[in-house]
Amino acid sequence: MSSNTRLLITRRLPEPVEERAKHEFDVLLNPSDHQYASADLVAACENFEPSALLVTPTERLDEAFIRQLPGSVKIIASYSVGLDHIDLAAAKKRSIVVSHTPGALTSATADIAILCLLGAARHAYRAQQDLRHGQWKRWDPTGYIGVELDGAVLGIVGMGRIGRATAMRAQAFGMEVRYWNRTTLSQAQLKAKGLSATPCERLEELLAVSDAVSLHVPYTPETHHLIDADAINAIKPEALLINTARGSIVDDEAILEGLKRGKLAGIGFDVFDGEPDFNQAYLDAPNAYLLPHIGSATNQARNKMGMMALDSIEAALSGNPIPNTACSS
């Protein structure tokens, strides 16, 4: 790749990714890992005249921002699977390719989904808080009573890569898997993944029969507040709700009300609407197991994400077929 090919990376990335970027591109890194304000990012692009941007979900690339990008920009590579932070229509209008990193974080995120499920099922947050703050005085035959996963029904909302990987892990715990998806998977597709799962035609049907519900749909206008007050009313009493997808898929007020009145036995959330700002009422719910969006936080996943992004950039700027495009020019 020519040293004249200029790449702007908006956040500090794992060392192997940055080393490759420095070797292959004229790159502007962000060693302090500061958060670019939109105006500052526009200014950086104007001063650096990049051919490519490598961005993360913490940058909101709306139509106004994309309209101000210099004409040199050919590709925006997102260090993510989800692309709700980028206006794809605006990018297409500017003939800018947008790529992402599907598959890179499947295993890592599925692991976190199971962690959230176990944490919610066994009151892990409250038990650990008591231990750390000197509130655990003795073994209690009726204390911290949770539920076992063996024999329970897990409802998967969205049977894509991460949904299927979560289902495989749940089966290892002896759970029965049911799912709701835009398209029903064939038995051959399920068998190829070692899965046994029963489809539900409607979301409400899945909610009514699931002891735990795990969300794995992308965020779109159609999935905004997919789990709302009506969904909570439809859910099986004392079910668990797990979200490792996107925070805006759930209606916070409906979830909190469900916890308050015992309709939900517990939740395990790794993502939040408006994060890192989120509804602080979750902190007062003892049956809420909460994590700060660490689904992809493994060396393997984060390195692979960066390498996939660089592969897409290299292909786009070399005139080769571009892998993992979500928006092509």
Image (cartoon, helix red, strand yellow):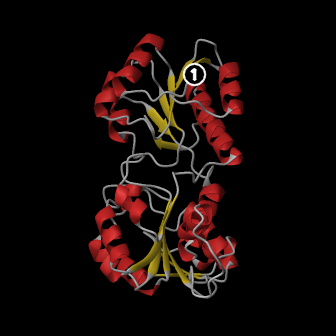
Q: Nearer the viewer, residue 327 or 126?
A: 126
Q: Split into 4 quadrants, where in the image is the C terminus? A: top left
Q: Count residues near mark 1 (Cα–Cα under 10 Å), then give few for <14, some for 14-19, many for 20+.
A: some
On screen, residue 46 above or below 109: above
Residue 198 in percent (x, y) is at: 53, 83
Corner quadrant of residue 4: top right
Residue 193 in percent (x, y) is at: 67, 70
On screen, residue 37 above or below 103: above
Side of 81 relative to 253 (left or right): right
Q: Is residue 139 visible?
A: yes
Q: Nearer the viewer, residue 47 or 58?
A: 58
Q: Nearer the viewer, residue 102 or 267?
A: 267
Q: Is residue 320 visible?
A: no
Q: Split into 4 quadrants, where in the image is the N terminus? A: top right
* Residue shown at the point (57%, 51%) measured from the top left: 294
* Residue shown at the point (36%, 63%) measured from the top left: 250
Corner quadrant of residue 66: top left
* Residue shown at the point (61%, 61%) measured from the top left: 132
Residue 258 in percent (x, y) is at: 34, 75
Residue 171 in percent (x, y) is at: 65, 78
Q: What type is the residue that disc 1 sits on?
A: Leu
Label 1 sits on residue: 29
Under circle 1, the secondary element is loop
